[in-house]
């Protein structure tokens, strides 16, 4: 059983052709951070005939099944991540690029959690933008 089939069985999802194609694109061809529009464009570039609505619905299904993560950059932009383990991101507001933050940097944060609790997830995005240079 390949990775796609294992994921579908684990999440009790039907193994449709469109899901298989989009899953393959998300994990093999697209960068690990992508928008629905980028995934749709990639699908069309690779000869996969699928509507943008189907892409959104498939991503939402994969998100609910825990196969992708939604990184809410702001109200009007959702970026999806195929790395579902908790980690933080750097988002460049100037270029629109998003990248994973080195996990070693997060270990330096000292977060005290009561003994009866554990951290169950992490959603941390550092937003960066180019500094305005003062004119002389």
Image: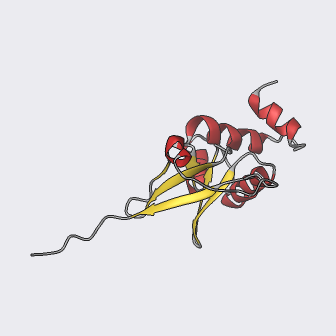
* Picture mark count: 0
Tell me the quadrant of the picture where the N terminus can be found. top right
Residue in the picture at 29% in, 67% down: 131
Outermost residue toward the front?
A: 115
- 76 in relation to 34, above or below: below
Residue 2 in the image: x percent, y percent?
Answer: 77, 26
Residue at 57%, 53% in the rendered image: 110
For this orientation, the residue located farthest to the left is: 136
Residue 115 horizontal/vertical position (percent): 78, 53
Q: Residue at x 63, y 58 (%)?
A: 123
Residue 82 coordinates in the image, percent (x, y): 64, 44
Q: Is residue 33 visible?
A: yes
Which image quarter: residue 19?
top right
Is 124 rendered above or below residue 5? below
Nearest the viewer among 4 and 115 is 115
Q: Classify 50 as above or below 131.
A: above
Residue 126 placement, left or right of 50: left
In the figure, 134 relative to 40: above or below?
below
Q: x, y percentage for residue 88?
A: 56, 52
> Who's the residue at 76% across and 52% down the image?
118
The image quarter in which residue 36 lies: bottom right
Q: Quadrant of residue 77?
A: bottom right
Identify the image's colour scheme: rainbow, by chain, secondary structure or one colour: secondary structure
Report the residue that reaches farthest toward the right.
12
Position of the C terminus, as image quadrant, is bottom left
């Amino acid at each position: 059983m390949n990775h796609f089939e294992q994921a579908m069985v684990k999440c009790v999802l039907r193994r449709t052709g469109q899901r298989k194609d989009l899953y393959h694109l998300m994990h093999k061809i697209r960068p690990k951070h992508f928008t629905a529009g980028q995934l749709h464009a990639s699908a069309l570039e690779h000869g996969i005939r699928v509507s943008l609505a189907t892409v959104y619905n498939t991503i939402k299904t994969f998100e609910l099944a825990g196969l992708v993560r939604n990184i809410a950059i702001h109200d009007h932009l959702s970026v999806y991540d195929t790395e579902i383990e908790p980690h933080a991101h750097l988002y460049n507001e100037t270029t629109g690029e998003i990248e994973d933050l080195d996990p070693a940097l997060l270990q330096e944060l000292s977060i005290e959690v009561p003994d009866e609790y554990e951290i169950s997830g992490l959603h941390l995005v550092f937003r960066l933008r180019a500094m305005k240079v003062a004119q002389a």
